[in-house]
Amino acid sequence: MTWSKCSTLTMLIQNTEIRFLWFEDCDPIKEITEYRINVHLFGNGPSPAIATFGLKMTVNHGEDKG
Amino acid sequence: MYFDVSRGPAHIQTCCTQIGACGTEYDLVTCPNMITVTVNFREKGAPELKTDIFHTSERMTKQYSHLRTRNSWTSWRQVSIHTNTLGNWELPHPSRSSFPSMPNNCSQAEGYLRNFVKTFKCKPDLKAQCLEFMEKVISKGHTSLVPREELHVPSGNFFYLSHLPIFHPKKGSLRVVFDSSLEFESVYLSKSLIAGPVQMSSLVEVIMSLRKENVAVI
């Protein structure tokens, strides 16, 4: 999975929070701590559908405004 | 069609396909067209009635299972969608509602990270690029540091992903990729996600759109 290029799709945490381990302040000398993933990750099964859905939503939103 | 000759007048029900409002859904509805039956069954002797006229074919069950995934997707879609304080869309994580909560695999992720860090010693270039990438990801707000009070909560449901560096063969750039197929206690992230709807339009849908209007836009 890679990071979504578009940061407009933030992930709402419901049941399970997705985390990963990395160094504090990105400094390898410092201790390892936990980070939480805030965005939808790409490369999964439903990812293309989520991306399309987000895009459509933005278009509809823009139309309403215009 | 079903002939119920023995119990008085014949009742025939015919169905036709109808396209839903959004243009992609279709279902069977009662057909308004009339059929006149000219043969008189009573005179020639009623034909033997069969009770097992209708049966579900394999293809039908396949279509229904497809509809089921579509339903779970629709229910996911209908969950409250809102914009957060930064003005970004916020959508829920597409996890299956029937799927049990993920196990806490912190120890496993720790092991993977240790292996990852080991490669840093022999590849200093990789180390610099990885750190740069992760810094970028954090500064963009894609990930955030978990506050100290939320660390090591025994009742919390967390699933840890392992990451590995991947080189783009053409660009030569590096990106850190998360492994959602990381298995822990026979559970992995990809398994817990709902399958999105099929992106390609099916042949039936294409034919239906041709029937709907004179010109079909696919």
Image: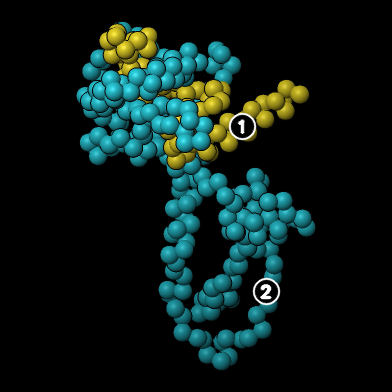
Chain colours: A yellow, B cyan
Q: Residues within 10 Å of mark 2 (few under 14, many from 20)?
A: few
- Estimate the x, y position of residue B131 in percent, counting from the top left: 39, 17
Which residue type carries mark 2? Ile
Give the quarter of the image for residue B36: bottom right
Chain ID of residue with mark 2: B
Give the quarter of the image for residue A32: top left
Report the residue that reaches farthest toward the bottom: B44
Report the disc number at residue A22.
none
Q: Residue at x 46, y 84 (%)?
A: B48
- Estimate the x, y position of residue A8 in percent, counting from the top left: 56, 23
Marks 1 & 2, CB-CB < 8 Å contact: no
- Estimate the x, y position of residue B158 in percent, counting from the top left: 31, 23
Question: Which mark's residue is nearer the viewer, 1 or 2?
Answer: 1
Report the disc number at residue A55.
1
Q: Residue at x 33, y 23 (%)?
A: B123
Q: Is residue A16 visible in this depiction of the protein?
A: no
**In this view, B193 is above or below B90:** below
Chain ID of residue with mark 1: A
- Distance between the Cα atoms at labels 1 and 2? 47 Å
Q: Residue at x 67, y 26 (%)?
A: A61
Which residue type carries mark 1? Leu
Report the disc number at residue B35.
2
Using residue B177 as the reference point, say whether residue A5 is left or right of it: right
Q: Residues within 10 Å of mark 1 (few under 14, many from 20)?
A: some
